[in-house]
Image: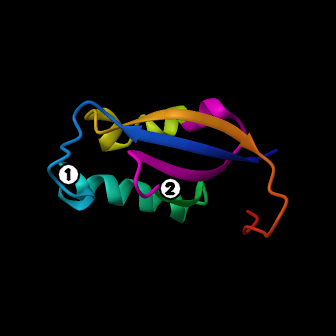
Amino acid sequence: MSQLFVVTRTRGTRWNYARTLEEQDHWQTHAAFMNALVHEGFVLLGGPLEGTPDILLIVRTTHADHIMNRLADDPWSRNGLLRVAHVHPWTLRLGSLPHK
């Protein structure tokens, strides 16, 4: 049975702080990869946490290991631009998200 997870990714060693998010190497392939995860219902919400080096994702899957395996295929993971900092199971108590 699937459950929700909160995933925090943070900038990796190859992040270029002189560039914006969209100017980072491999931006187009990273964006296409992440959009595909949204399209299939794996990533439900995501975006940068302003004023931090972190990205927050809300993910629906059956196991935390699945998250690590899927995100390892992200071009930004493979190229050292992002890494997973934390994965936590999450129980949504207020509001709702689409069910799949």
* Element carrying mark 2: helix
Left or right: residue 12 versus residue 36 is left
Disc sitting over residue 90 in the figure: none
Left or right: residue 87 versus residue 62 is left
Q: How many residues crowd around disc 2 within 10 Å: few (fewer than 14), some, or many (20 or more)?
A: some
- The quadrant of the rendering that contains the C terminus is bottom right
> Label 2 is placed on what type of residue?
Leu
- Residue 99: % across, % down: 76, 65
- Residue 15: % across, % down: 24, 40
* Element carrying mark 1: loop
- The magenta region covers 49-67
- Real-space Cα separation, disc 1 to disc 2, in angstroms: 20 Å
Identify the coloring.
rainbow
For the point 62% across and 29% down, the residue is 65
Q: Which residue is mark 2?
A: 37
For the point 27% across and 54% down, the residue is 29
Q: Are marks 1 and 2 in contact (CB under 8 Å)?
A: no
Circle 1 or circle 2, nearest the eye = 1
For the point 53% across and 42% down, the residue is 8
- The quadrant of the rendering that contains the N terminus is top right
N-term-proximal mark, 1 vs 2: 1
Residue 50's place in the image compared with 76, above or below, is below
- Residue 93: % across, % down: 85, 59
Residue 51's place in the image compared with 89, above or below, is below
